[in-house]
Image (spheres, helix red, strand yellow):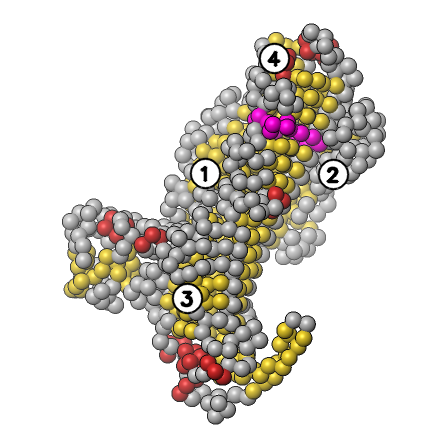
Amino acid sequence: MKKLFTSKILLAFVAIGACATLSAQTVIKVGAGQGDKQKTIQMAYDSIVPATVAGAYVLELQSDYDPQTEIYPITFTAKTGASEANTITITPATGVKKIISAPDSTIIFDNLVFASGDNVINVSSIDGIKNGMAVYGVGLSFLSNPYRFNSVVSVEPGKITLTSPATATYTPDRKTFVGKSDTKTIVFDGAKYIIIDGVSRTGNTGLEICNPNSISAQAIYFKNNATYNTIKNCIVRGANVSGQINNGFAGTIYFMGGQYNTITDNDVCDMNDPNIPFPICPFQMTAAGGANNNNKVLNNNIYNISNLHSANGPFTFMQFGSEGSSANNWVLNNRFYWTTATSITGNIIPINIGSLSSGNRFENNVIGYGAADGTGISTVISNNGTWGTGNGMRYFTCKNNIMAGINYTGTGFRGFSASVSSASYAADDIMNGNTVKDIVFTAVENDKYLEGIYLSGNLATAVNVKNNTVSNIQIVGSNPDIKCTAYGIRQYGTGANAFSYSGNKVMGVVAGESNSTTANAAYGIYVTANTKSVVSNLITDVTANSGNTSAFVRGLQTSGSTSAGQLIANNIVRIGTTVGSDVSITAFHQDAATSDADICKIYNNTLYIGGTAPATATKSSVGFLHAGLAPKNDLKNNIIANKRTVGNTEAHYALQIKIISEINSSDYNMYQFGKFFGKIDVDDASNLADWADALSTPPTIIFDAHSVVADPQFEDANAVMPDMRIKATSPAKGAGVALTDVTTDFNGFARTTMDMGALAYGTVSAIETVKPSSIGVYGADKAIVVKDMMGQNARIYTLNGQLVKSAQLLSDKESISVANGLYIVRVGSFSSKVLVK
């Protein structure tokens, strides 16, 4: 064996359990000058006799290694004796960068035209086209049903003849692909304990693994239960635009039988060639090749996908567990994005979950922006598709992920969602700690929606929806007649399992623009009947822009209750300050709620409506409104302050109900109101006394005996980021009643005295502090200047929340060019208004 290898044998320490043993490491240099059996990776790998794997091997690529001398695919089979200690590593030598790539046999045509019944296609060139090659293209109906490729049966100057005639006239605006199908660059065929280490993606040492072919092509392929292999520090590129039978064989990295493999610290992306389209799917796990379980995909940059040129196949960053194949217990922690504006066809589902997946963990991922460092914008355009529908996080955890920096054009947008779960998941793991922010969705069809976070009510287990943040998301219509609906967090469905909502922040949800003519609607948090509790959530700046007076805004909306009743406590809702149009506004809107036995406990909430309505406004606003007929509500220790400016004919109520029996009891609350205190059915109650008298008939319970109408004296309720703490002189301080259901405040601090509202006196603010415009952020000549914040990311918005520009601050004084106008600038946790003139 020593004569076979030209390199030396090294000693390496390999830790096994608590012990460390010496393991021999043999370095095999690979290159043209290394001997007949070491010219290629395949030769060097095959030269390792299975029985001799008694130590670790390193196949080190030299500067004279020529990837074009490989016979593709490079295939790694199992080696007897390979183990965690006895690995086989393929890596470049220091200072060596190589591209390992299957030969490109794909010819791409634009604007081919033929008629129904034709099986001859005129082409501009026949260079490289051979009999037997596959033909693939959007719009070629004879290719898309069933999902099989047509083949070339003859080649003549200027034309090719196909195996079957066209069944429809084809005038494409996209591309047609002719070439070899089923190409692969590297295959792990039952291989174990192989490491491909590219060393660096940016330095002078590196490794790219590519497949530039466009028809059923994979760069890396796992089959026959390939296990314990690692791919790291590489750039993996693909160009496959095609699905095949049952949407298979689409992934740049493809699993047809592989477990316990690790793919980490790679770029998985397009070919970086403007003449080669983006691939349809970076990762796919499919059927027939065995289980695809317990793999880890960590810290990779996964970017640039499109299905614009695909007639079928999964269009997603990762396709999981479908078509008869399991894909269980994966761990995912990556960045997914587009570096350039991208057109697609139909829906985009960032992570597409099949019905056979379970135990998977989707945590600490980032979807969006235009680069791995969180700068720029992912711009995706689809004229007929929805972002993020489908199965959502089906049998997945969804924790601590970010979806941000996205401009999407299509027919719907849903951020993180959970639709089916397993009873084995902890309630805290299903939707916890996620952030959805800086999203602009342009709807191209009428009556479409934007949802930051979505929960199906039919989940198989209880769910604690907690510590999620939704901020600065907006839906606009591609024309003013398109109706837009926006939800910060939405739960839909009436399954039996109880939901709990706590610690969520919804800050800036916008539906429509000021020139809209339709009844746009915006909700902060919307939950349904199987919700157990809504506690310590923050909702601010929910806005519906429209010239249509049927538009409306609702901060918190609940519908129905669990059999044990709901607890609605310690929530802060501040809305209205960003609403300038004549629309209906409700801080807390309750639909058909509870039965006599299911009391809804509404305790220690701070509900505030501010802002100024147009002088001719006709629509009212309400702090708490119940729209149903059969609830039983208990209201205590709430601050319900409606300080919206009164127009000519509108009214701004503290409370509104259908019938008096909707309130079971009410006391120790503080109210503010505009023209009237409240409304019962169609009758206005002018003041608290009239309201209490109406509810106390018959007088079995005295309502609001200890409630007051007063100014709660918030620190700054109308700031861009509101401060809803009460001042030392507030009449709400110590004026409440002790409640066993509410022993802490919004921030979790113990209530030593029972103050009204969500924030106990002396607690910290609920919202991040505001950066004054005089400190570091100011307007200049057609620019915004940011000082002393190098390394952070600045985002500039219009006043209605639409993202204008995002910029990485590369120095202590950065000038960001913008048109004249008034903007909101956010840098880190600081915000300020800036006038540019």
Percent position of residue 741, x then y? 73, 30
> Tag 1: residue type?
Gly
Q: Give the distance between the C-alpha atoms of the residues marked 4 and 1, in whole angstroms.
A: 37 Å
Looking at the image, is mark 4 or mark 1 nearer the viewer? 4
User: Who is closer to the viewer here, 517 or 816?
Assistant: 517
Residue topped by disc 1 = 412
> Tag 3: residue type?
Asn
- Farthest-out residue, top: 698
Which numbered disc, 3 or 4, marks the residue that appears first in the sequence? 3
Looking at the image, is mark 3 or mark 2 nearer the viewer? 3
Label 3 secondary element:
strand
Residue topped by disc 2 = 747
User: Do callouts 3 and 2 mark residues in contact (Cβ within 8 Å)?
Assistant: no
Looking at the image, is mark 3 or mark 1 nearer the viewer? 3
- Farthest-out residue, bottom: 3
Residue topped by disc 4 = 659
> Tag 4: residue type?
Ile
Residue topped by disc 3 = 224
- Residue under the image location 80 percent in, 27 percent down: 738
Q: Give the distance between the C-alpha atoms of the residues marked 2 and 4, in whole angstroms.
A: 35 Å
> Tag 2: residue type?
Asn
Q: Quadrant of residue 602?
A: top right
Q: Quadrant of residue 244?
A: bottom left
- Residue under the image location 45 percent in, 50 percent down: 356
Q: Is residue 796 visible?
A: no
Mark 3, Cα crowd under 10 Å, few <14 / some 14-19 / many 20+, is some
